[in-house]
Image (spheres, rainbow, N blue to C red):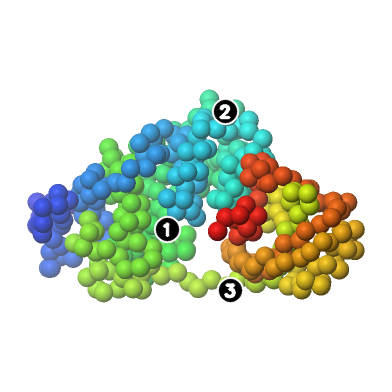
């Protein structure tokens, strides 16, 4: 049941159209959490109508495009995703093309986005869609959730944005916004907290504007109630109902229980060059960075002499070695602290190494972002 707006006053502080819809909470009758969520709906929708960023997947919100964009946007910034999305759409414009693509080509298209299982699950889901749903994402929240790589958030996003089905899409942005609006100091990493917020949003969601409602919340979290830095409360369409702002709790909300510290691994990365080719090796089919290509590397921080000895034992004729700098890459549970060496070889040693041309490195072989600093060095980029 929605709020009877005749009982509440509205106010405006400027000419911004959404501010005319801000709700003034009665002092003698504070909102319940559910009413507070419902009270933010009108200003949120008005704000989104005039402030939504122009994004390629929003301009053409077909189900396939929405799905691909949502998977790409997991753990990745919007600006970083745009060129990947456009390139992906050009080469794999529909579900059937994705279902048939060779995995190595798919991973190359994904190179730099990280979390490569996302790409593998895309292909698996596309194959199911081709066999079971006529080559299109299903128009059902429950059916979407059954597909590989699609959880409740992604299912909600596809269902609401592509099909306007009134189901919530609660990601990190939305959890932050709603936690602050409600002044909730519960741990947002707990599934029980997420489910509670999903229920509040489901009750408040306008049935005819599910897409705008969900995207408005996500957009507010992305550009106003930002994840890093001070929230832009003066620009926020939810300012009048935000309990966290009123109580001065924005610095402590949202709350996340501390994670266990990541394991640190020292690694030595070898850029082995021979006759204008560079050595790669393929990682195992399972585990971290499965089936991707990498520059040869070993555990520990080796000296130049250690490197020369190790390569000589493998039958390599070393011409010269020079430092290639240090780099760090953070995975979810481990950090790689890398020391690199650029090694010129007189021969192609037998064994696991695959020596490829630089153009092939750019166009053919998927190399994880963990080695991006060394890829730039090889390509002569700053």
Whole-angstrom CA distance, mark 1 to mark 2, is: 31 Å
Callout 2: SS: helix
Q: Say few, some or many: other residues with alpha carbon within 10 Å of mark 3 (under 14 / 14 to 19 / 20 or more).
A: few
- The answer to which of marks 3 and 2 sits earlier in the sequence is 2
Q: Is residue 135 left or right of residue 334?
A: left
Of residues 161 and 379, the one drawn nearer to the viewer in this rendering: 379
- Location of residue 56 by image quarter: top left
Residue 367 in picture, x, y percent from top left: 65, 50
Whole-angstrom CA distance, mark 1 to mark 3, is: 21 Å
Query: As displayed, is residue 283 above or below residue 158?
Result: below
Residue at the spot 14% in from the left edge and 49% down from the top edge = 17
* Residue 120 visible in the shown view: no
* Residue 104 visible in the shown view: yes
Q: Which residue is mark 2?
A: 96
- Location of residue 338 by image quarter: bottom right
Of residues 359 and 214, the one drawn nearer to the viewer in this rendering: 359
Whole-angstrom CA distance, mark 3 to mark 2, is: 42 Å
Residue 319 in picture, x, y percent from top left: 82, 61
Q: Which residue is mark 3?
A: 261
Dot label at residue 172: 1
* Front of the two marks 1 and 2: 2
Residue at the spot 15% in from the left edge and 62% down from the top edge = 25
Callout 3: SS: loop
Residue at the spot 37% in from the left edge and 48% down from the top edge = 168
């Amino acid at each position: 049941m929605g709020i009877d707006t005749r009982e509440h006053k509205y106010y405006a502080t400027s000419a911004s159209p959404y501010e005319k819809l801000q709700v003034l909470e009665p002092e003698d009758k504070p909102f319940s959490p559910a009413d507070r969520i419902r009270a933010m709906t009108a200003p949120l929708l008005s704000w989104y109508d005039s402030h939504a960023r122009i994004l390629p997947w929003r301009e053409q919100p077909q189900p396939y495009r929405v799905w691909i964009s949502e998977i790409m946007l997991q753990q990745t910034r919007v600006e970083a995703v745009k060129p990947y999305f456009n390139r992906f759409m050009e080469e794999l414009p529909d579900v059937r093309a994705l279902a048939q693509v060779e995995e190595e080509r798919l991973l190359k298209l994904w190179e730099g986005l990280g979390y490569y299982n996302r790409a593998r699950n895309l292909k698996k889901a596309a194959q199911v869609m081709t066999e079971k749903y006529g080559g299109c994402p299903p128009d059902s929240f429950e059916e979407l959730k059954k597909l590989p790589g699609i959880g409740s958030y992604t299912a909600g996003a596809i269902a609401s944005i592509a099909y306007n089905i009134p189901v919530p899409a609660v990601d990190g942005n939305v959890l932050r916004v709603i936690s602050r609006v409600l002044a909730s100091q519960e741990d947002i990493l707990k599934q029980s907290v997420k489910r509670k917020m999903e229920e509040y949003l489901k009750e408040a969601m306008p049935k005819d504007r599910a897409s705008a409602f969900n995207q408005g919340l996500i957009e507010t979290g992305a550009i106003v109630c930002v994840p890093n830095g001070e929230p832009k409360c003066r620009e926020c369409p939810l300012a009048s109902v935000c309990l966290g702002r009123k109580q001065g709790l924005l610095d402590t909300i949202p709350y996340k229980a501390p994670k266990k510290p990541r394991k640190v691994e020292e690694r030595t990365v070898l850029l082995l060059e021979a006759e204008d080719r560079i050595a790669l090796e393929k990682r195992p089919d399972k585990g971290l960075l499965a089936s991707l290509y990498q520059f040869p590397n070993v555990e520990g921080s080796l000296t130049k002499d250690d490197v020369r000895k190790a390569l000589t034992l493998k039958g390599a004729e070393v011409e010269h070695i020079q430092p290639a700098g240090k780099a760090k890459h953070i995975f979810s549970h481990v950090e790689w602290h890398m020391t690199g060496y650029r090694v010129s070889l007189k021969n192609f040693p037998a064994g696991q190494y695959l020596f490829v041309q630089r153009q092939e490195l750019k166009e053919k072989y998927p190399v994880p972002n963990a080695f991006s600093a060394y890829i730039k060095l090889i390509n002569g980029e700053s």
